Image (tube, rainbow, N blue to C red):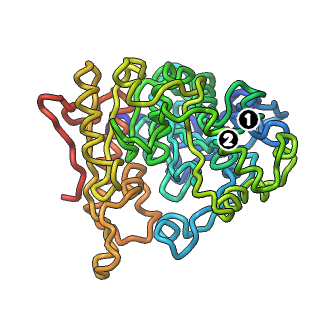
Amino acid sequence: MRRFLLFMAVAAMSAACTTGNPVLTVTGGKIQGVLTDSSDVMVYKGIPYAAPPVGGLRWQAPQAVASWEGVRKCDTFGAIAPQPGNAPGTFYGDEFYWEGTPEQSEDCLYLNVWAPAATLGKPDAELPVAMWIHGGAFMNGYGYEVTMDGDAWARRGVILVTINYRLGNLGFLSHPELTAEQGQSGNYGIMDQIAALKWIRENIAQFGGDPSNVTVFGQSAGAMSVKDLLISPASRDLVAKAIIQSGGGLGSRGLSPDRAVTQEFYDTQGKDVMECAGLATLPEMRDASLETVMGASGKYMQAGKGYVMFSPHIDGNVLTEDFDHALFEGTMAAVPIMIGYNKNDMGMLAGESVDRFCSVRDSLGFPVYEYEFMRNLPGDDDDPDKDPGAFHSAELWYMFGTLKNSWRPFSDADFALSEEMLDAWTSFCRNGNPGWDAFKHDKPFKKTFDTK
């Protein structure tokens, strides 16, 4: 690792002296990035990976990027998918969203790339690549939240890509007219993720990345998305490795698509939701204001029709089976998997469901690595009524190396734990081994992460 960092430092200084900021050519046109504060890592913010899904493209599969003229300066993150957000005064609002919510727009299909400056424009560098999928219950979140940064990853020789994808009504609505038009409907957010994976396959060599060595990883709804990408016929061949963080394991019913629920059910539900907003036909739905569409679920609940959360489902095309059946039937991507959870995670996100998955995955002959994040985050110890411990999403500060962005009073031991986790995550991306023993069904092993 020290030799690699020294190489990067020397090569970056050489590149700065000889080539400056190289212009890269990607799908759609030419781009330039900006150096991070580290000065040997380049970040490309707001690269479009699909056409804006607006107007007639609302509730359509992602379409090809429109070309642009000249060199696009990628120094500003793109708008995020429309979402309700996390209000100040709520736990997650105060923990992660105290800076407020960035600009929201249906024009949200952008990704961000962090890469070593020394490898830009050098396809033969063949660095490992990781694509991060944010969580947020398929309703909230974006690819550059305060916890998320690729600087520490790139300095360890792993190119990090983070993405936005469509959420809520816009990302996962089904409707009879959409199904008639497209053969299935819903899962637009998963299609966005697959489009981003394809963009990486086609373009990441420009940044020095290896398009055949892409790890998909995510947390919460992002982890559930990873599970979907592992089993989708459209994506499983694009994945070399996967990390599932707090997304449940085997038998996590309610956390992943259920093949007992039909497309017709989702179509009927979506039709009811849209009609509660006064939208009876597909042309009306596509012409409606963003506010009307986003408010449809609220009107549905106000009408006493119950709670509705739009999320991935089996549609016979993007998703043809549930995660459990794909595991047993051998149709899941045949790749190494790292899977884990936080000590104070909720219900089926953690514990036995993950252990069961690891046992079955190993018995089928595939490497699998389990972990548990144990660190009770500092800052709440003086308030017995507010001590969330190793809560859901707490590990993000550590495995992205962004402790400095938090209000919490982290110690040297926390920064050491962050370094340990960064080394493990990036090691797995490089060679499929995070640095601890694989789980064996007859000799289970689980790595624990806590301060020393």
Question: Which label sits on residue 268?
Answer: 2
What amino acid is labelled 1 in the image?
Pro
**Left or right relative to 234: residue 227:** left
Near-viewer residue (201 or 226):
226
> Dividing the image into 4 quarters, which one contains the N terminus?
top left
Contact check, label 1 and label 2, Cβ < 8 Å: yes
Count of picture labels: 2
Q: Earlier in the sequence, mark 1 or mark 2?
A: 1
Residue 257 x/y as whole percent? 49, 36
What amino acid is labelled 2 in the image?
Thr
Residue 246 x/y as whole percent? 38, 47
Give the alpha-carbon distance from disc 1 to disc 2, as whole Å: 7 Å
Residue at figure coordinates x 82%, y 40% from the top left: 282
Residue 143 visible to the viewer: yes
Residue at figure coordinates x 48%, y 66% from the top left: 92
Near-viewer residue (220 or 285):
285
* Residue occupied by mark 1: 176
Residue 340 x/y as whole percent? 31, 43
**Left or right relative to 200: residue 388:** left
